[in-house]
Amino acid sequence: MSFLIISSQRDPKNWVKALKEHYPKLDLEVYPEVKDPSKVEFALSWKHPHGIFRDYPNLKVIASMGAGIDHIIGDNEIPKDIQITRVVDEQLTKDMSIFVLSLILEYIRNLAQHHCSKEWKPGSYLRPEDVQVGIMGMGVLGVGVAEKLIQNKFNVTGWSRTNKEILGVTTYHGDDQLGKFLQESRILVNLLPLTSETKNILQKSLFEMLPKGAYLINVARGEHLVEDDLLEVINNGHLEGAALDVFRQEPLPKDHPFWNNKKIRVSPHIASITNPKTVVPQILDNYERMKEGKELQNVVDREKEY
Amino acid sequence: MSFLIISSQRDPKNWVKALKEHYPKLDLEVYPEVKDPSKVEFALSWKHPHGIFRDYPNLKVIASMGAGIDHIIGDNEIPKDIQITRVVDEQLTKDMSIFVLSLILEYIRNLAQHHCSKEWKPGSYLRPEDVQVGIMGMGVLGVGVAEKLIQNKFNVTGWSRTNKEILGVTTYHGDDQLGKFLQESRILVNLLPLTSETKNILQKSLFEMLPKGAYLINVARGEHLVEDDLLEVINNGHLEGAALDVFRQEPLPKDHPFWNNKKIRVSPHIASITNPKTVVPQILDNYERMKEGKELQNVVDREKEY
C-alpha cells in the first residue's frame, strides 16, 4: 500500500517534508515518477492532469491539498466509489476572514484610491454600520467571514443552497430568495464552492439584481465569474467596482483588461495559503482511517459536489 | 452675549446650519464679518489666524471643532484664563479605530502593493497574532484603536506620558520606558497629542530604537514627524515603510518626496472627519454651562497642552 502526492502547479517539496516528519515510514510516491501505480490506495492531490487516475486501479481516496475540491470533481473519469476529501483548517478560515475584512475596509475607506492615485483628494467614507455585506456560500469559510464582519459592526446577510441558521446573520437560501438577498447587498462576497450549478453564477442577470453602486469581492474561484459581464456592469456604472483574488486563468494574463481597469483591484490568489505543516496531520489521520476501514473526515458529497 | 464661529481652512456652513437647527435663537457671528467683538464670549474655532483673539476682550471659552487643540494652543497670545475645550465624540473614535485597522490590514496583506503595482506577485503575509502593534498616546483615540486591534487578535502595547492601565494592553510610560516599548513594536502607530514636548518626536533616534523592518503609521499630526529622518530610515532599509495621513503642510505639496516613494502611502487627512450634526450638542451644552457659570466638559489642561 502506498501514498501518492500529485501537485501539478505547486512544488510538492514542503508536503513531502511535512509528511516524512509526521510519518517517517510512509511509502511515498511523487507523481510523475511512480514506481508501482497498482499499490497506490491514497492520493494527495492538487490540480492533477485529468484522466490519470485510470492508471491507479486500487485507489480508494483522493485528498485535496486545500479547501477546494473543484479541481478533483471536474475530472469525469474518477470512479464513483473513490472518496474525495477536503481540508478544513482553522488557519485557512482565519486567513480568509482577515483577507475579506481587509478588502472591505480598503474599499469603504478608499485606500486603494488614495494610495495608488498619488493625488490629494479627501472625500467622505462609509462606516461598517452603514454597509450591508451579502455573503454567497455559508460553508466553513462563509461563516468565518460573517463572524469576523459582525464583530467589526458590519451588517451581514448570507445566502446558500440550503437553509442555514447562523447567529447574527440574516440568511437566505435557494433560487427563490436569491433576488431578495442581492437587492440588499451593498457589498457582495462570493465564497461559494465551485460546482456545475455555481459555475458562471456571477453574471449579468445576477449583477443587475444588486443595488446600483454595489461592489463585488470574489475570493472563491475564477470560474464563478463571467468576466465580460463584470466589465460591462462596471463600465456602465451599475457596479462601483470589484476586488478579485481568483481568475479563470492564473496568473492573470498580462494583457487582460482587468489589469488596467481603475475600478478593478487584482490580487494574485493570496486570500489564504494552505500550510502543509498544519494540514498534514488531518491528511494522515484520514490515511490511517482508510487503512483501518473507518469512516473518513471531511468527505465531499459527490452529488452536491462540495 | 454672542457665539463666534471661526474656521479658516474649512467652510463653516455645515456648522452654522447644525447650530441653527439646535439653537435657532443663538446670536451667531461668523468670522471675519463680526459686528461686535466685545459681545463674543464663546468661540468655536478651527485653525484661527494667530493673534486675532486680542480683539475679543470678553472671550471666555474657545471650543475646538475637533479632537485636536494644537491649532489653538499654538497661539501664544491667548490669555491664560480663557478655557479651551476639545471634542470627544464616540464616532470620531470609531472612525479612527477602523481607519488604523484598515491601514494595518492593508500593510500585513500587502494590498497596496498588489493593487497599485499591477503585477502578479504572490507572496507570504503576516497574521494579526504574529504582529505586535505599539500605540503611542493612550488617550481616548489610542484606547479605542487598541481595543479594535485586540478584538482582531493583534498583540498591542501602549506608551503614554503617564502610567495608564488598559485591559489587554501592556502599557509603558515616560522617557525611561520608551526604548523598551519601541524595541518590541513591529508596527508603530502615533496617536499622541501635539504639544511642545511631542513635536518632532518621530525622529531618527526614535526610529533607530524600532526593530529592523518596522512600519510607521502616523494619524496624529504632521508636526510630530521629522520628514527627512523618516526618508533616511526608509531609504537605508531600517524601516520597511510608512502610512501617513497627516503632514506638516496640507495638502501635501505636489513636489514632496513622499508622493513618489514606493514605501510611503499617503492619504489626505481622512482618518476621521468631525460631523457637525453629532458634535454640535456637546458644544452647545458647554455654551449653556458657561452662561450658567457651571464647570465645562472636555476642558484642556493648558499646562499639559492636551
Image: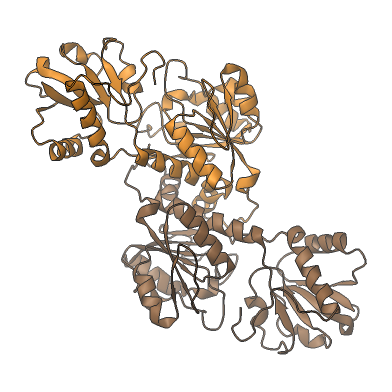
Chain colours: A brown, B orange
State the residue at coordinates (7%, 18%): B36
Q: Which residue is located at x 53 percent, y 61 percent? A: A145
Q: Position of residue A250 (x, y in %)?
A: 60, 67
User: Could you tell whether B155 is left or right of A290 in the image?
Assistant: left
Query: Is B9 situated left or right of A47 in this image?
Result: left
* Quadrant in the picture for the N terminus of chain A: bottom right
In front here: A281 or A171?
A: A171
Q: Residue at x 84, y 86 (%)?
A: A58
Q: Is residue A258 visible?
A: yes
Q: Is residue B48 visible?
A: no
A56 relative to A164, above or below: below
Q: Is residue A58 above or below residue A220?
A: below
Residue A29, located in which quarter of the rendered image?
A: bottom right
Task: Single out the residue that lies furthest toward the right.
Answer: A25
Image x and y of residue B131, in percent: 62, 42
Residue B253 position in % (x across, y down): 37, 32
Residue B92, given in percent of the width and then of the height, sits at 36, 39
The foreground one among A150 and A237 is A150
Question: Is the residue A111 above or below the residue A294 in the image?
Answer: above
